[in-house]
Structures are given as structure tokens and as C-alpha cells.
């Protein structure tokens, strides 16, 4: 981290969310000397941080980060913050947006870490619905910068810091403003074209539900005791992954975004060759040692289905892209968990884009609600 | 077996199909002294039977059954036969019907062993399309009477003979005629209400594709080295089975047929108690030791999807029954095998019931094309 580049003072961060991700980020920022506040909806988690006066971080970063403030009062956390880092599961974005609406200032920068699919679009829609006239800049990261684990309250383990995290803002021309604001702390953030790209350029969105569902019984009967990718993906099930992924790419193409297919992405990211997706997965060293989740109550279903598959399907239906594989996975996940992930998920209605044309969706993603 | 009950002479059987099932049936019939012919589309299989002069049977039945005739000429096999036992996979029924059409006599009885879903309806539709005016009686068994394995050409192993096999004819009032004809050889056959019942009262139709797909990667990466039901069905995946099975029951109800749910069926068949389907499966002794198929190229997908799920979905759509789980399974199976099981499958068009009301479908199932 390098601070004070273009800023006279170090930016003040408000981290919203005190799960393992929020604790890791707030602790890391505080260790690096950035004025840091942390907010959580439930008082219990922030009290532990207050008791300790900060957050202990282990792993790639080691130390104690003393925070300015740990609070369950979101207005207090936001007051005077330069950058608002939202680090909650995607189904929490809507509530965070509602709670922030009356407090956010137009000079503040909000970053969803990550947005999952269309998180920034949903966030600005909620602010708009809440009557916010002078919008802050709302951005979304394509992925979460850390691989982190929660150990105890007021403590987190950072297993890995990713070295390149695409980010895009609404409006898109403000992406450089976001980068300027967060680069003192996170030089790893790089500009993406726009939020349609950060939302859709994510093979996990289709991989996670596919691999988890195609191994549902095995996960439950072995408590995840197998290699998630190397045993959990077989030549035939790889074709289901490939079909699901092709639908993601097709939705992107219809929105005017060129996305890499999963196979291309593995080649670019890991030099994994292979004529088929199965070969590419087998040849991906990073997948070795990745174990299956121990339970089906996991974000690979609970978050990725309603917050990634559902918005892809819903947008696809509106703009004429068929997504039968994503629909099949969503239905089976709903039966599996006896929940209606469609009703819970980010449909076009919840994103505020119901009935809009491709052109209008692009305009909203590029310009937001500002005039 | 008891012969010569109401018949002066033992009925002559033509067994169509020389896979393990056809060999088992023809061999068994011949051992019991019934005049038996066996037909197969490819000459190779019947030549082996001709070379040997008959079929060796091992297992529950032991002996050598000398056949009258082993031929690839279907007219020759049918000529003078009283009962035509069709023992081919369900996707072969159409071709068998086409080949039989010009040879079948109205006093002959055809039995599909088994019909899978709507096999008899398809068979009479094909005969009708082929211009047959004076229809034979066409019946379908709900299940195949043997659990058998193929060992070599001209040889089969009978692992089990089931003790009750429901059968129904088109027209339904001819079911007793079918029973009279086959009972000398097979007292295990019992009357079902009609072919809608024999077609739909089959939990395997929904269990096999569900369990296989929800364990697809495990089957392929372990070559089926796990307990198919006891490990392959977990509490959550049992809910997918239950959802799929409920759609089967709903299609039946809309057609005026009361079917038992899978959970009820396990209770009736095995005294398996349990408030949930998962508990009932866990408590079913017959499932212990049933291993998973070694490959996904298995009739649990290749036959049950196009020949059972597709007709249920297709009929459901026509008569207003939603089958989203069966559709999801069919789509994923198609992606898995890179085949269009919908196009291959028994849709209402292929069954000759496209556009027909529930009343007209029932009339066809009960009365056939006879006037």
C-alpha cells in the first residue's frame, strides 16, 4: 500500500459489514494507517471490536489494526468517510443501500466488494427509489480482494490478497475517481469497462452452482470430502458447466459486452490448455487442493443462485437470450433447499430495469440516474 | 409356470429382442416347454442362438432352452405366434411396431416388457399410422419381469423373477385376454386398470434420472463405486426426488389416475416408514447393496429421460400440469450427453395425442383405434 499520492491526507474508510471479509479489510486498512470505521447491523459483532479496540489480522498480513470506530449506527460510520467499502453478502446490498440512503453525500465513493451480478445497478436503483437526488459514486468490484477466513470476533485470517481486481462505477466515467480514492490503500484495483462487465465477467457465478448441484449428494453424504474441481467435475458434468457458462457469455454479448468463456478464461488466468473445458479444468494447478464445501448451505448456492443466476436469467428473458441451463440449475437449487430462489433473487424488477431495452439498460449502467 | 390351463395347446411365443432380457425370456420359455421363437434386428445375435440351437440360462432358472427359431426376419418370427413379447429398450418400440405392422394378426397379443411411459399408446399409434385396420391387442407391462444380465451370446443369467407384474391392454377390456394368453407361462402377470396406470405408476421413472444426475460427477469419477440409493440420496437431494415424483403423480391425477407417491410406494412395497422420502429410502432394505451405475451411458438416463420424463412433460404441458423439475432434469441430461433428449423423446406428437383433451387421451388409452 502506498498512501498520500494525490491526497494531502489519507482517505478515511468506512467498512460496512463485520463478517470475515469486513474484518479482514478493516483490520488491514487500520494496520496500514488509514482512518477506518467498521459498521455491522448487529451490535454484537461491533462490540467485540470495541472491546478489543481494533482487529487482529493473521496470515498474509499480521498485526493489530486500531479502528476509529466500530458501530451499529450506519450514519455515524459514514459521517466524514471518503470511501465506503461494502463487504456483505450480495443479498444484503439492498438493505445496506436503504440504510445508507439518507446519509450518503455526493462526494463519497461506495464500492461493493464484490457486486456479484448487477449489485451496483441494484444499489443505485435503491438509492433512487429512496429519493436520493445527488448520487454518490457507486462502484462494484468484480471479485473480493481477499481470500479470508473468520477466526473469532475481532479477528480474521487473510490467506491471499489478489493482485488484480477490476472495478467499475456508475456512472462509468467516474471509475477513475473511484480508483484515485482507493488506490492509496489498494493499488490492486484496476478499471473495468463498466458494471455490466464486472457483473458478468465471473466464471464462478456459473461454476459454483453447477459443480455444487452436480455433486449435491456427494457433498452431503461425505461432508465435502473430495476435490471440488478435480473430482467434482467429470467429462460429462463439464459439459453442463460449459452450457451454463455459454449462457452467461450470451447474456453479456446481447448487452454488448465481450466476455471470455470459462475455457478461455482458464487459459488466460492459468495458462490451462485443453480442447475441452474438462481438459482445461484438469490442467489448472490452482484447482488442486480446493476441497468441496462441507454443506449445501453455502454461498455457492445461497448467494450465487439468487444473486447471479437469477439476474442473468431475468435479464436474458427480457432481452431475448435463452438460459435453459441456468433456469434448470435455479429450479433444482430451489427444490434442494425448499426455497424460492427466483422470488429471493435479483430480477429485473428489483434492479429497476423491467421493460427496459438493451440500449436503456446500457445507458443506466453507463450513466446512472444522474442528469 | 403352469401350462395348459384353458388352452388345449401351449401358446407359441415370439420374443422380439435378443438382449439379455429377450434371451432370458426366450430361454426360460423354451426350458418350460413353450414353443418359442426369438427375433433380433441384427443377424449376429440370432446366429449365435442358431449355432447353439437354443439359449443357456443360469441363476434362478438353470438349463438349456431349445428354440423353434432364431431369426432376423420378423415376419417369420411372428407367423403363427400366439403371444408376441417385445423385449427391447423403449426407444426401439417404434421401429418394432413399424416392422411388425404388416405381419400382425388381430388374434395375436403383443406385450411390451415393459412399456415405459406410454409405450402401448405409441405402439398402437404407429400401427394405426401404418394402416393396420384390424388391430392386435397391444399391452404393456409396468416393469420387466426379470432382473437379468447378459453373459454371452446365447446365454443369460436370471437374477430374480418378480412376483407381481401389472399389465394392461389397449383396449382396456382386453386385459383379461392378455392375461389368459400369457398366464400359462407367467402367472406373475396381474391386471392393471389401464395403460395410463402401467405407464405412470413407476417411481423409477423419476428416481433414476434424479439420482443419476445429482451424482453425475461422482459416478464418472468413481465409476459408480458407491451405494446408489443409500449414499447417492442425501436429505437435500431427496427433496429433488420428491419434487420430481410429485410432478409424475400430478400428471397422473390430471389424467384421472390415482398414483402412489414414492414415499407411499416405499411404504407399501417395503414397509419403509419415514416422515420424509429420505427417511423412507434409508429404511428400505432392498436398496442396501444397490451400487451406482458405472457410467452415465446408462438406461437410467438414456432410456428414462426420453421415454419417461419427456412424455410426462409433454402430456403435462398439453393438459395444464407444470413439470419444472422434470424439465430441469431433462435439460441437464441433454447438456450432459450433448443430445437433445426432447427431440428423441416420446412427445405427444409421437404418441398421436397432440391437441387431444384429457377425455380423448383417456378414450384412446381405454378403447384404442378400434371402432
Image (cartoon, coloured by chain):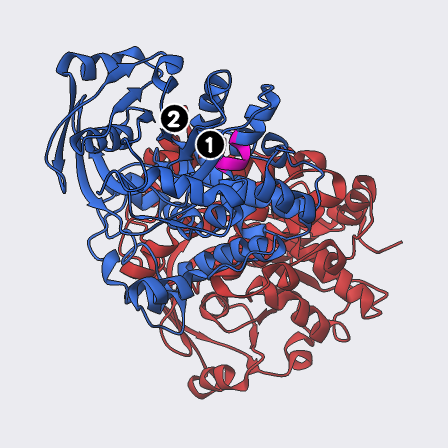
Chain colours: A red, B blue
Residue that label 1 marks: A263
- SS of the residue under disc 1: helix
Magenta region, residue range = B119-123
Residue at 33% x, 62% y is B269
A84 on left or right of B278? right
Q: Quadrant of residue B213?
A: top left
The image shows residue B182 at horizontal and vertical percentages of 34, 38
The image shows residue A105 at horizontal and vertical percentages of 77, 69
Q: Main secondary structure of the magenta part?
A: helix
Q: CA distance from mark 2 to mark 1?
A: 8 Å
- SS of the residue under disc 2: loop
Instruction: Pick whichever, B96 or B210, lies toward us.
Output: B96
Residue that label 2 marks: A274
Relative to A166, say whether B41 is above or below. Answer: above
Residue A279 in view (yes/no): yes
Relative to A133, say whether A254 is above or below. Answer: above
The image shows residue B118 at horizontal and vertical percentages of 52, 40
Amino acid at each position: 500500500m502506498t498512501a498520500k499520492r494525490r491526497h494531502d491526507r489519507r482517505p478515511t474508510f468506512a467498512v460496512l459489514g463485520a463478517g470475515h471479509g469486513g474484518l479482514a479489510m478493516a483490520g488491514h486498512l487500520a494496520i496500514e494507517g488509514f482512518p477506518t470505521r467498521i459498521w455491522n447491523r448487529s451490535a454484537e459483532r461491533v462490540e467485540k471490536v470495541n472491546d478489543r479496540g481494533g482487529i487482529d489480522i493473521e496470515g498474509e498480513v499480521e498485526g493489530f489494526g486500531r479502528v476509529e470506530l466500530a458501530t451499529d449506527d450506519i450514519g455515524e460510520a459514514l459521517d466524514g468517510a471518503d470511501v465506503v467499502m461494502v463487504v456483505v453478502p450480495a443479498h444484503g446490498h439492498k438493505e445496506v443501500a436503504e440504510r445508507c440512503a439518507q446519509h450518503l453525500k455526493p462526494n463519497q465513493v461506495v464500492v461493493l466488494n464484490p457486486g456479484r451480478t448487477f449489485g451496483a445497478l441494484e444499489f443505485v436503483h435503491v438509492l433512487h427509489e429512496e429519493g436520493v437526488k445527488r448520487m454518490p459514486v457507486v462502484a462494484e468490484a468484480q471479485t473480493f480482494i481477499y481470500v479470508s477466513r473468520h477466526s473469532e470476533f475481532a479477528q480474521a485470517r487473510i490467506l491471499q490478497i489478489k493482485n488484480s481486481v477490476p472495478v467499475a462505477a456508475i456512472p462509468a466515467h467516474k471509475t477513475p475517481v473511484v480508483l484515485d480514492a482507493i488506490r492509496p490503500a489498494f493499488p490492486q484495483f484496476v478499471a473495468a469497462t463498466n458494471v455490466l462487465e464486472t457483473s458478468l465477467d465471473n466464471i464462478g457465478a456459473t461454476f459454483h452452482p453447477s459443480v455444487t448441484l452436480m455433486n449435491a449428494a456427494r457433498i452431503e453424504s461425505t461432508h465435502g470430502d473430495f476435490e471440488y474441481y478435480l473430482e467434482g467435475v467429470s467429462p460429462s458434468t463439464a459439459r453442463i458447466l460449459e452450457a451454463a457458462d455459454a449462457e452467461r457469455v450470451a447474456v453479456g454479448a446481447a448487452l454488448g459486452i465481450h466476455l471470455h468463456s470459462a475455457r478461455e478464461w482458464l487459459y488466460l488466468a492459468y495458462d490451462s490448455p485443453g480442447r475441452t473445458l474438462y481438459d482445461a479444468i484438469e490442467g489448472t494447478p490452482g484447482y488442486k487442493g480446493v476441497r468441496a464445501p462441507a454443506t449445501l448451505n453455502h454461498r455457492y448456492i445461497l448467494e450465487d443462485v439468487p444473486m447471479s443466476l437469477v439476474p442473468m436469467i431475468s435479464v436474458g428473458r427480457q432481452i431475448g437470450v435463452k438460459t435453459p441451463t441456468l433456469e434448470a440449475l435455479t429450479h433444482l437449487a430451489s427444490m434442494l433447499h425448499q426455497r424460492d430462489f427466483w422470488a429471493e433473487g435479483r430480477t429485473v424488477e428489483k434492479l429497476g430495469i423491467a421493460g427496459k431495452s438493451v440500449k436503456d439498460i446500457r445507458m443506466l449502467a453507463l450513466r446512472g440516474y444522474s442528469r
